[in-house]
Image (cartoon, rainbow, N blue to C red):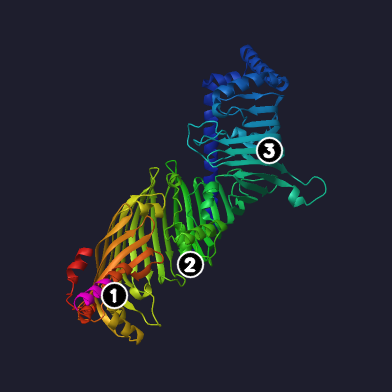
Amino acid sequence: MKRPDWNRLKTDAAARGGRLWADGRSRIHTSRAWVGAHDPVWRAWRRPGRTEIISAAVAGLIVLSVMLVLALFDWNYLRGPIGRWASAQYDRDISIDGDLDVTLFSWTPSVAVDGLRIGGPAWADEDDTLRVARFEGSARLTRLLAGQLELTRAVVIEPEIVLIVDEDGRRSWVMDDTGPDEPTRLPLIERLLIRDGRVRVDEQGRGLTLDAAIDARELAEGVGDEDERSGFRLEGEGSLNGQPLTLRVLGEPFVQLRRDRPWRFRAELTGAGSELSANGQITRPFDLSHFTADLSLSGPDLANLYLITGVVTPNTPPYSLEGDLARDDSLWTFNNVTGQVGDSDLSGDVSVDRVDDRLRVEADLRSRSLDLDDLFAVLGAPPDPTETASPEQRARAGAMRAQARLLPDAPLRTERLRTMDGRLDFRADEVKRNELAVTAVSLGAVLEDGILSLDPVAFAFAQGELNGTARIDATGEVPQSTVDFRLSGYPLEAVIPARDGQPTVTGRALGRVRLQGPGASIADFAARSRGTITVVVPQGQMREAFAELMGINVGRGLRLLLSDDQRTTPIRCAVASFDVRDGIGTATTFIIDTDVVLAQGQGTLNLRNERLDIRIDGESKRPRLLRVWSPITVSGPIRSPTVGVDEAAIAGQVGLIAAIGALVAPVAGVLGLIEPGLAEDANCGALISQAR
């Protein structure tokens, strides 16, 4: 293969480059000659005449005059026009009561203002929104020419800031309330100094007041800890819903700030029984719409956070949580949450956004080991005395125990539910040992326009499960609620206590509760509800001694009981149905059918005062001696009912036996204690079908 001639190639390339350069120069000269021959402006510039010279001189003189006037101008003449224009523009009284000085001809144009005052809106005109004794600021000229404002220095002396939010949510510091609610974005300030400032906050809707001192210094002044004395400081005290409030914010000095360098801060807030602490950074200095922080919070009840955050949270036992807080415009996230609520662990993610001018909360929460009392506290139920609880919760628990009440009476804050929308998904992988034998919990909740839907409400037991839904309409002053819960496969031995270590009754219970009605609490709802309550036991076993006693077969029943006979008899079925009207459930069906006794009952389940009043008449299916013709009574508080017999009926039977013995013969009186055993089996299939 023939090798290329590199020297020849170089020579040819150089020749071509030379020709291109010559062609380019030729075109430039041709264009220049054409412009010089045909463009009058170019000809006048190259050979100015008398007219051009006079025009240039006049223009230069005007420019010099304007520059001289601006340099020597007394800017105080513009204080009045500026104040009147600003007052008309923003519909509030704005004025400059001191000197106004502006320096334009500099690489960092500056302004100094004494006595700046911005009044409040018409509805809060008794308080000025801002008063500043003196403000000095300088901007970078190159940024101004590019249409951006970047302050190289800002000094604020004795600012007094008043921030008011009225009952309707109007904010006194919003100059133009016609646009959307945007996060605060200030221009970059490389050096910011604040001296002897005050901030006063009055948020009337939450009962929030704060009076704080604000300073921003470059270095410590005098002897002391430089880290504590320098930098940004905001410290104040006030009240929140009648309780003391303290706020402390510390930040780095505002020196040599850059847009690509975060500004770090530390904040502590105590109020409404809650404590919040954050260590974070504003990603872009003075752009408060973006920041991140490590947040920790604790207190006696998560519901108290509503007063601080405006986010509806449930009632809980004392809590301690921490996680990663971040803000991205209107979206707030609290991710990687870990901590304790009562005696349960809690983890997950929470987000809060503003959609169509309404808060929307999304929460995915988990508990590896849940204490059931902590979950019931969400419904307003008081904790067990041995559990973690706040003093208020312990006092409420004591009052409910003294009244033998079971249903919680903590009111639902309907006005809070109407302020936001949201979704909750909660799952407990494991539940600590409890009397109900609950092993796992799954809850889902959706809140839309004041209507709270709970679906699912699922409890898994060691045997059996409870599933259901609930709907709470909180759009009115009194909530309207509907609940539908189904119980399946729950063991009777978990409810009815054993005797001598042996279960008295075994079997699987099925149940359904369908209620609806008004009520501001669970207790109030139950007391005013209507619907049905049904419990069914398709089959099971009962200790024969108790079955006989259920029929008041004293002879055989006592003999089996006293001899500790453990023999059982089948439960063919048991059905109890109550028709609830205005909180009072009347038994429409009450049957317990065993192989030896058929028991039928009547009475009421009173949800108003949480009391039972049931009478059970038992009939033996086999002949029995010493049968007492008296109903069994189940009465008293639902939480701890008392089982007994109708003493009046027993007295009547004894009187009848005595009368027969006196009138006929002593032997004839014994007939009053004999049970012929004529009871027949109940139609269990039909009863169970109707109950479901």
Residue 608 pos. (x, y %) = 37, 55
Callout 1 crowding tier (Cα within 10 Å): few <14, some 14–19, many ≥20: many
User: Which quadrant of the rendered structure holds the C terminus?
Assistant: bottom left
- Dot 2 or dot 3: first in sequence order is 3
List the residue tagged with mark 3.
198
Q: Residue at x 52, y 38 (%)?
A: 23
Residue 204 pos. (x, y %) = 55, 38
- Dot 2 or dot 1: first in sequence order is 2
Helix, strand or loop for disc 2: loop
- Give the number of the mark in front: 1 or 3: 1
- Give the number of the mark in front: 2 or 3: 2
- The residues colored magenta run 654-664
> Residue lying furthest right in this view?
223
Indicate left or right for 427 with 302 as reference.
Answer: left
> Residue lying furthest front in this view?
663
- What is the number of callouts on the image? 3
List the residue tagged with mark 2.
371
- Dot 1 or dot 3: first in sequence order is 3
Callout 2 crowding tier (Cα within 10 Å): few <14, some 14–19, many ≥20: many
Please identify the quarter of the rendering in which residue 599 is found: bottom left
Q: Are marks 1 and 3 in contact (CB under 8 Å)?
A: no
Magenta residues, dominant SS class: helix
Reply above or below: 353 against 435.
Answer: above
How far apart are labels 1 and 3 at the CA level?
Answer: 79 Å
